[in-house]
Image (cartoon, rainbow, N blue to C red):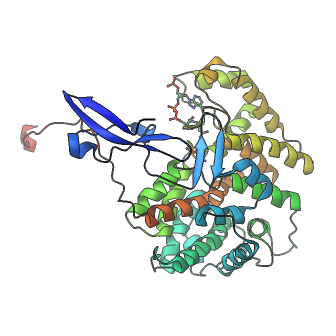
């Protein structure tokens, strides 16, 4: 493969280095393009533009491959745990038994949240969407942990990682409890992360809380499947916000807000709302497929399509099977799972979806499992955020430790050219 690319414009030739990644991806390094030629590139939505080199997650959209630090998502979701994968993503290697136990213990040490945070929470109406509450509380954590992370000090980095992982689960659950008018729970450090999260969410003071191992395993697997996904919208946001040297909590808060959008993490909530709409409308799947194909109808098949996957999202395959397993193990019959499967079957035979390579993505089936586990629809995207947190942290650290420049894109100006001011009595 050639190690350079040549751009020819206006009778001049410009040469740029070509970089080859460890999975043989090819990139033209245009860092010197504007300096050499005065020209910029334009790429709305960055569909063809890499923002960074990264060693964290590799995905191949054509082949439906997803790997965290070289390990396949299929193996990790089967054999690992959310906290172990968090260690892998953030520190680059699978932990030893000693490292893992220490990591779990150090996270538990950080599972208390300042009592004053409750005053902020009390200011939200119960109707507030939990994602808006979570973004605000995450940013507010800065007020109670004001010392910026010294990214050159591994111990400071490790402590900051444990702090935000420990506290994020609590404030995520508190966002839910606030929306339900329920008393806030404290962490139970005698149980592991996922079981603790479930009790933070659902334990009521008057009863002992028991969660089945099947539910914990299903939740753990779902969180692993959401842990990172290279430069998606919210992760790119975390990296850009962090590139100004804004703090880790502030950068994560920005990521929560980006994830909230229905085209991104908010899709898991939108999928269930769409399936319920189809069910309430009588279950006529073909009618909604027609709506999704109609360019004049804003309706989209939520949970379908992906910027990168032009094949089955490997996470969707695993989650689809897990949905069957969880509902069977819990003895739940959920008619919207049947609607989802029917919708998938019809869409994958329809030329509109086939020609555009629109397949179910991670959000298409995840909500069905969350429902079965008792998570309310409004909390689905919060679940996505709880899962994605370690990836955001890993990507933020990679950007800061790599001393990357502040993210500041250029633009092509197409507005009014220079003109004189007009006094108001002459307009
Ligand atoms: C996530 O990037 C990541 O990695 C994200 C994520 C992660 O882990 O971080 O994987 C998580 O965000 C998954 C995606 C969740 N979003 C949804 O399910 C919302 C529905 N999907 C779409 O809105 C859309 O597919 C996107 C946003 C996911 C991707 O949009 P693109 O890549 O910008 O593609 P596009 O909008 O340009 O669509 C290309 C064509 C268009 O038709 P034409 O103009 O060519 O005629 O496909 C059509 C679109 O109208 N299309 C759809 C569709 N998705 C795309 N038509 C109907 N239903 C859909 N869902």
Q: Which residue occupies the foreground of this view, 155 or 194?
A: 155
Q: Is residue 404 visible?
A: yes
Q: Is residue 203 above or below residue 70?
A: below
Q: Which residue occupies the foreground of this view, 123 or 137?
A: 137
Q: Is residue 351 above or below residue 409?
A: above
Spot the residue most to the top.
Answer: 351
Please name the residue shown 70% across and 66% down the image: 83
The quarter in which the C terminus is drawn is top left
Q: Which residue occupies the foreground of this view, 207 or 50?
A: 50
Where does the image place residue 407, in percent across and percent down from the top left? 36, 55
Where does the image place residue 414, in percent across and percent down from the top left? 24, 35
Instruction: Tell me where residue 364 sits by quadrant.
Output: top right
Q: Is residue 188 left or right of residue 404?
A: right
Instruction: Tell me where residue 4 sits by quadrant.
Output: top left
Where does the image place residue 275, in percent across and percent down from the top left? 72, 36
Where does the image place residue 281, in percent across and percent down from the top left? 73, 29
Instruction: Tell me where residue 133 sits by quadrant.
Output: bottom right
Q: Is residue 179 visible?
A: no
Please name the residue shown 21% across and 39% down the image: 37
Give the quadrant of ligand 1: top right
Q: Which residue occupies the foreground of this view, 123 or 192?
A: 192
Please name the residue shown 35% across and 35% down the image: 5
Please name the residue shown 46% across and 80% down the image: 147
The mark tally for this picture is 0
């Amino acid at each position: 493969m050639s190690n350079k690319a040549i751009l020819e414009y206006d009778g001049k030739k410009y040469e740029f280095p070509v970089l080859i990644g460890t999975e043989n991806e090819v990139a033209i390094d245009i860092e010197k393009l504007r300096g050499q030629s005065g020209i910029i590139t334009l790429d709305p939505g960055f569909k063809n533009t890499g923002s960074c080199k990264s060693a964290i997650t590799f995905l191949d959209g054509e082949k439906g491959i997803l790997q965290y630090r070289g390990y396949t998502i299929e193996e990790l979701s089967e054999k690992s745990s959310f906290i172990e994968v968090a260690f892998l993503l953030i520190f680059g290697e699978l932990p030893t038994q000693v490292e893992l136990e220490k990591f779990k213990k150090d996270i538990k040490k950080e599972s208390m949240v300042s009592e004053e945070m409750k005053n902020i929470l009390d200011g939200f109406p119960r109707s507030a969407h939990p994602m808006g509450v979570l973004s605000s509380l995450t940013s507010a954590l800065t007020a109670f942990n004001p010392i910026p992370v010294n990214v050159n000090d591994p111990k400071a980095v490790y402590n900051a990682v444990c702090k935000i992982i420990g506290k994020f689960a609590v404030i995520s659950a508190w966002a839910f409890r606030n929306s339900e008018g329920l008393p806030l729970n404290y962490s139970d450090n005698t149980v592991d992360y996922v079981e603790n999260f479930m009790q933070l969410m659902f334990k009521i003071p008057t009863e002992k809380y028991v969660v089945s191992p099947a539910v914990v395993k299903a939740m753990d697997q779902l969180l692993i499947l959401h842990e990172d996904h290279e430069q998606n919208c919210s992760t790119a946001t975390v990296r850009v916000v962090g590139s100004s040297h804004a703090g880790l909590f502030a950068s994560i808060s920005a990521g929560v807000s980006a994830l909230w959008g229905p085209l991104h993490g908010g899709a898991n909530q939108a999928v269930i709302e769409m399936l319920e709409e189809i069910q309430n409308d009588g279950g006529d799947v073909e009618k909604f497929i027609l709506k999704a194909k109609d360019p004049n109808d804003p309706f989209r098949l939520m949970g379908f399509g992906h910027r990168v996957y032009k094949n089955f999202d490997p996470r969707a395959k695993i989650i689809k099977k897990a949905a069957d397993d969880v509902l069977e193990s819990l003895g739940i019959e959920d008619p919207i799972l049947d609607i989802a499967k029917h919708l998938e079957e019809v869409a994958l035979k329809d030329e509109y979806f086939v020609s555009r390579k629109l397949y179910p993505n991670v959000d298409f089936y995840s909500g069905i499992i969350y429902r079965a586990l008792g998570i309310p629809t409004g909390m689905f995207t919060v679940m996505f955020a709880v899962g994605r947190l370690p990836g955001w942290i890993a990507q933020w650290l990679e950007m800061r430790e790599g001393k990357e420049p502040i993210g500041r894109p250029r633009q092509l100006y197409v507005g009014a050219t220079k003109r004189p001011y007009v006094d108001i009595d002459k307009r």
